[in-house]
Image (cartoon, rainbow, N blue to C red):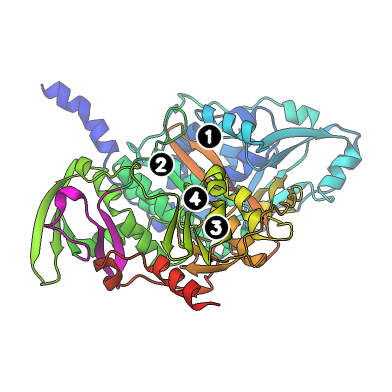
């Protein structure tokens, strides 16, 4: 028995929380920046095949121990010389870059070219297949070029220098001749790390370093990245991950880092076998943030009439709901802290149900009476069936279109009523169906010009000398019959990505007014990466080439702003829909 307990001690010790000193945090920040630059841009064919999970996990202990910048420089230089023999890490002034290397011979010379990021896709077979079917041409290739062509590509700057710390610099060639491209590495990895986990501090720190580097080198909206102070996000995330002892705490550390970017595409989660996630039905118990209170918006039938809309949720498992929102809010990317708090309210049940089958909820009614219920989460699930008609009349002569479920045949069947309508309301508050692009041409007498997307072409770290590859989108030709009724498009924080494409098209072509709340501020094509074969990271991989005002990270403000009140909730009213009907009735 004693031997069994002693055998368990090392495993228990590795799961203990860790603490990084300022010195260790500084060292690991330098390691992370150097690793990302070498991993993605040092053009040796063997460097491209190494396991960076293994490299980082094995090197972190020695890097942490370096007591000074001078010692750190020696440690990092020794490490990366085995992976990138022509790279140099020095303390003090940077090594002067050499230029014109390609002009010394005819070549070929080898270099990395990333169109987006096609690496880090192991274990995501369905994602890769979907990219191919959708025509998303992400690629990552070591290419070859003759001397003059290679020199032209890099504008004579064939070495890259990056300052890792204020007194530490990395310099390495972006172009290698054939011999160095094929050069075998002296690196001896030892036992590989096939999968990352939260069991050891080194593996948790590696998860953060790999995730941070993908956004650092491949996130296409650089102004958004800079305004989020992405460089400063890494040390904080490393300290947070070091203290984590479970996968949930590690994911919280990563999500808190990622939430610095106001981009709803940015997320990390445990990887499934296919890379896809099943969407659960909506909650029958729906919550809404109203005047900084978490208010019941919709009640499951099994809880009525004991619980009514308008009741305030005060505690979950005896914990103040405000504290729970504070924990969750910091992990959600959003255009503002207020929007993040609203999204946290909507995600609260999902958050709490992740670790339990039931919970105790304390509600306060209009008479200030409190009541606590123990509720099983399986009984709080709603259904995607028995929803209202996709097209319906909500007031005399005013029709509502649920864009999330709308299909073109639904629209065609309703055309006689829509042609005679006084007004039409189109709900964009959830992701619209793609059939909406067949409906919009009936709202304009002129062709519609949607925004284009462009893929970043990267041959150097940190988006240096980046270019974009893309083609102009084709106009959407107007279609008869033209619907002349006034139109209102409902928007909110869930109006992003394709929904935001539609909202921007509506505004630029003046197809109607936007009513509700500011949109999500996220658009472009998504990309995915596997982190340590355990986690899946998503981000915006291709950017929008806009024809109007930029809105990435900020969103589109509505023409008519509407915020639901407690009175709307108690009376079961859709505040945005109600205001849209009023506006259409008052507008000639």
- Residue 301 lies in the magenta-colored region: yes
- Measured as percent of width and height from the top left, residue 375 is found at 15, 47
Q: Is residue 166 visible?
A: no
Marker disc for residue 269: 2
Separation of disc 4 and disc 2 at Cα? 10 Å
Image vertical order of residue 520 relative to residue 113, above or below = below
Q: How many neighbours does mark 4 have within 10 angstroms: few (below 14), some (14-19), or many (20 or more)?
A: many
- Measured as percent of width and height from the top left, residue 231 is found at 53, 58
Of callouts 2 and 3, the N-terminal one = 2
Q: Could you tell me which secondary element the residue under label 1 belongs to?
A: helix
- Measured as percent of width and height from the top left, residue 533 is found at 46, 31
Separation of disc 1 and disc 4 at Cα? 22 Å
Quick check: marks 4 and 3 in contact, CB under 8 Å?
Answer: no
Mark in front: 4 vs 3: 3
- Measured as percent of width and height from the top left, residue 120 is found at 56, 34
- Residue 427 lies in the magenta-colored region: no
Quick check: marks 2 and 3 in contact, CB under 8 Å?
Answer: no
Separation of disc 3 and disc 1 at Cα? 58 Å
Segment tinted magenta in the rendering: 283-310
Residue 335 is left or right of residue 320, and the answer is right
Marker disc for residue 266: 4
Mark in front: 1 vs 4: 4
């Amino acid at each position: 028995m004693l031997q069994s307990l002693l055998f368990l001690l090392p495993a228990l010790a590795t799961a203990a929380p860790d603490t990084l000193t300022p010195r260790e945090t500084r060292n690991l920040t330098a390691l992370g920046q150097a690793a990302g630059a070498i991993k993605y841009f040092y053009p040796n064919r063997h460097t491209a095949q190494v396991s960076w999970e293994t490299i980082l996990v094995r090197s972190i202990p020695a890097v942490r121990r370096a007591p000074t910048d001078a010692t750190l420089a020696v440690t990092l230089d020794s490490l990366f010389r085995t992976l990138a023999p022509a790279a140099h890490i020095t303390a003090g002034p940077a090594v002067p870059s050499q230029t014109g290397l390609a002009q010394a011979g005819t070549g070929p010379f080898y270099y990395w070219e990333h169109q987006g990021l096609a690496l880090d896709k192991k274990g995501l077979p369905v994602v890769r297949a979907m990219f191919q079917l959708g025509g998303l041409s992400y690629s990552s290739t070591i290419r070859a070029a003759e001397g003059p062509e290679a020199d032209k590509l890099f504008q004579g700057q064939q070495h890259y220098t990056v300052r890792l710390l204020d007194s530490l610099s990395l310099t390495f060639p972006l172009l290698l001749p054939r011999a160095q491209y094929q050069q075998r590495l002296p690196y001896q990895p030892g036992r590989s790390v096939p999968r990352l986990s939260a069991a050891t501090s080194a593996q948790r720190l590696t998860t953060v370093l790999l995730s941070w580097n993908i956004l650092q080198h491949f996130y296409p909206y650089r102004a958004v990245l800079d305004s989020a102070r992405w460089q400063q996000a890494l040390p904080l995330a490393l300290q947070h991950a070091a203290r984590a002892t479970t996968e949930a705490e590690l994911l919280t550390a990563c999500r808190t880092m990622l939430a610095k970017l106001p981009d709803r595409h940015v997320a990390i989660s445990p990887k499934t076998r296919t890379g896809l996630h099943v969407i659960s039905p909506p909650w029958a118990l729906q919550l809404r943030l109203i005047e900084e209170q978490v208010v019941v918006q919709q009640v499951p039938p099994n809880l009525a009439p004991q619980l009514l809309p308008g009741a305030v949720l005060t505690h979950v498992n005896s914990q103040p709901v405000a504290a729970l929102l504070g924990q969750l809010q910091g992990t959600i990317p959003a255009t503002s802290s207020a929007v993040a708090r609203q999204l946290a309210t909507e995600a609260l049940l999902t958050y709490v149900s992740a670790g339990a089958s039931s919970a105790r909820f304390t509600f306060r009614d209009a008479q200030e009476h409190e009541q606590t219920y123990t509720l099983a989460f399986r009984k709080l699930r709603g259904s995607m069936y028995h929803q209202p008609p996709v097209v319906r009349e909500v007031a005399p002569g005013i029709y509502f279109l649920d864009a999330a479920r709308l299909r073109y045949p639904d629209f065609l069947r309703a055309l006689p009523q829509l042609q005679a309508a006084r007004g039409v309301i189109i709900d964009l508050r959830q992701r619209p169906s793609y059939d909406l692009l067949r409906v919009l041409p009936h709202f304009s007498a002129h062709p519609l010009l949607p925004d284009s997307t462009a893929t970043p072409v990267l041959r150097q770290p940190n988006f240096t000398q980046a270019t974009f590859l893309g083609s102009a989108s084709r106009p959407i030709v107007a279609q008869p019959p033209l619907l002349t009724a006034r139109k209102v498009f409902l928007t909110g924080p869930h109006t992003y990505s394709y929904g935001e494409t539609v909202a921007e098209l509506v505004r630029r072509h003046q197809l109607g007014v936007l009513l509700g709340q500011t949109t999500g501020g996220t658009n472009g094509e998504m990309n995915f990466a596997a982190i340590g074969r355990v986690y899946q990271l998503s981000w915006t991989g291709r950017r929008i080439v806009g024809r109007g005002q930029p809105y990435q990270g900020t969103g589109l403000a509505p023409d008519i702003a509407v915020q639901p009140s407690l009175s709307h909730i108690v009376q079961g009213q859709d505040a945005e829909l109600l205001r849209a009907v009023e506006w259409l009735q008052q507008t000639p």
